[in-house]
Every structure is written in structure tokens, then in C-alpha cells.
Image (spheres, rainbow, N blue to C red):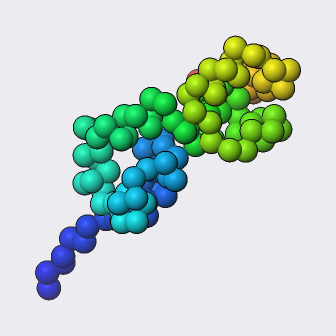
Amino acid sequence: MTQHQSTQTMKPATAAKKLGVYLQATPAEFQEGVVSRAELNALQADPPEWLRELRRNGPHPRPVVAAKLGVSIAGLARGGITEPLTTEQIEALKQERPEWLEKEQATQAEVRKEAARVRKLHAERAKKA
């Protein structure tokens, strides 16, 4: 009995997430089709102009916006940011430095500091064991 290797495909939303772009800003043919693993790898290795443009100028999905601002996705929501933002809008927020952004960046810094402390503690315990 011979096994046939099926081509692994994904929905456009999954592919957009893996590419770090906002699905609704992608071309219609991308949104309407399915994306194979090979096609995704090709897009990552040699992005077409539309993908380079989206990555450069947006609109960006919330995880990308959060990363660029140095806050969590929940922090974005607490700050009232629920829609995708362009690079220009993100830069404007960085310049304006609203109170919510400074607070969320401080919170995120504390979370990272605590995570590093816990990792160090676990590493020390593992060394002793």
C-alpha cells in the first residue's frame, strides 16, 4: 500500500498571521484562496512587493502593533486601540507618548523583568538538582 503525500494547506487568515500582516489589507487573490506550505515558504523567502509594502507601512495586525509599541495586546485594548494601525500612526503614538502607553510600557517591562527572574531561578534550581 502506497501513501500519498498530501500538500499541507492553510486558510488565508493563518498564512497572514504567520506572515505578520493584516489579512484585510492583502490582495483579493490571497484572501480568497488557500496557501500551501511551499507557497508560504516562498512568500517568506522572497516577499512580493505587496507583502514588503504591508510589512513596511501597514496596516499592521494587533500583535505587530503591540510589539512595535512595546506593550501587550491587552495593553493595546486598555489603551483603546482596537483597530489595525499603520506605521505612521504607530510612530505618531510613540511621539505623543500618551499616558496609557507609558503605563503599559512600564507594565510590560515589569512583566519581562519578572519572567527573567523566574527563568534564572529555575535555571539555578536545575543546576542544583
In the rendered image, residue 52, in percent from the top left (x then y), is placed at 37, 34
Name of the residue lying farthest toward the bottom = 1
In the rendered image, residue 61, in percent from the top left (x then y), is placed at 58, 43
In the rendered image, residue 27, in percent from the top left (x then y), is placed at 39, 53
Q: Quadrant of residue 128?
A: top right
Please state if 91 lies on the left or on the right of 107 as rendered: left
Residue at left offset 45%, top offset 29%? 56
Name of the residue lying farthest toward the top = 95
Would you say residue 95 is visible in this rendering? yes
In the rendered image, residue 88, in percent from the top left (x then y), is placed at 58, 25
| The one of 35 and 93 positioned closer to us in this rendering | 93
Would you say residue 128 is visible in this rendering? no
Residue at left offset 32%, top offset 51%? 40
| The one of 44 and 52 positioned closer to us in this rendering | 52
| Quadrant in which the N terminus appears | bottom left
Please state if 19 lies on the left or on the right of 115 as rendered: left
